[in-house]
Image: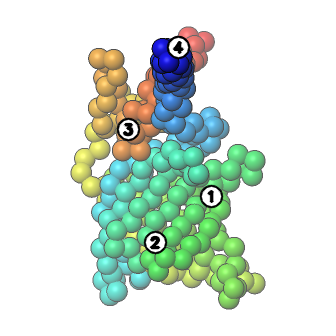
Amino acid sequence: MRNLCKSAVCLLCVSALLWFVSSVQGEPEKAASASSAKKSVSIPAEVKQALSEFNSLIGGWRGVGMIKRNSRKGAWSEKAEWVWKFDPQQSGIAYEVQDGKFLKSALLSYDPKQKTYQLSTVLPDGTTRDYSGTLQKDSLVLESKPDQEGAIFRISIRRLNEKRTLVLFEQRNQGQSFYYRLAEVGYTRAGTRLAAPGSGGPECIVTGGAGTIAVSYQGKTYYVCCSGCKQAFEDDPETFIAEAKQKAAERRKQQSR
């Protein structure tokens, strides 16, 4: 009987030891998994460079939409915000519109193979429409494919200066070469921009735009341009700090030539 009890006790001890060892070994794997999941999505350098062209849009805007230019008939007010988005499914610059008549939201991305910008939009009624296009001087001109009725839509985003932006909505029928105006939204920046790229002010450590939000890591302060970049930096600060150091080194190298 004693031998049986001893055997049972030994078996329990061995089982407990094996459970403890497996638990300890599993913790690093869980930590590594959590750390990996927390890593932010890295946007390819060519794509980030192309989208950085629109860093001046980042932030909040107040808009007035007009069906006819200089006519208050049918006019409306809306608010919009441009913010960087780092997501496994879709990364780019998000364009969120409040009380808009032609757009509810959109995501601006870049196709390095086609060398074109892509704009995936959600309309106020919840339907979607995709555009593609190129940068033409100071305007980004994007065109949709024909819909079931043969209508083709165009969006032109024109940056007048740091505080003024125009978004023009147009349409034409398939087979026609000219567009007719649907509406235009004139945006004025909400609030004051703290800094502009190249002005000597803070620079966003994630995208290189104007740094307007302070973040910290290991006791040092850095700046980001929007909530999307803030989240990306907090998820993976060391990657963005390393990229910023590399950019600074390349900049110094070019200046010394």
Task: Evaluate if marks 1 and 4 touch, with contact meaning CB atoms under 8 Å apart.
Answer: no
- Frontmost residue, 33 versus 94: 33
Up-down: is 237 above or below 67?
A: above
Identify the image quadrant of the C terminus.
top right
Mark on residue 3? 4
Mark on residue 103? 2
Question: Nearer the viewer's eye, disc 1 or disc 3?
Answer: 3
Real-space CA distance between mark 1 and mark 4, rounded to the nearest whole angstrom: 76 Å
Secondary structure of the residue carrying tag 3 is helix
- Residue neighbourhood size for the residue with mark 2, other residues' Cα within 10 Å, grouped as few (<14), some (14–19), many (≥20): many
Tell me the amino acid under the disc marked 2: Leu
Q: How many marks can you see?
A: 4
- Residue neighbourhood size for the residue with mark 1, other residues' Cα within 10 Å, grouped as few (<14), some (14–19), many (≥20): many
Q: In which quarter of the image is residue 212?
A: top left
Secondary structure of the residue carrying tag 1 is strand
Tell me the amino acid under the disc marked 3: Lys
Name the residue beneath numbered marker 3: 230
Residue 41 spot, x, y in % from top left: 55, 39
- Look at 25% across and 47% down and name the residue there: 192
Seen in the image, is 32 located left or right of residue 162?
right
Tell me the amino acid under the disc marked 1: Gln
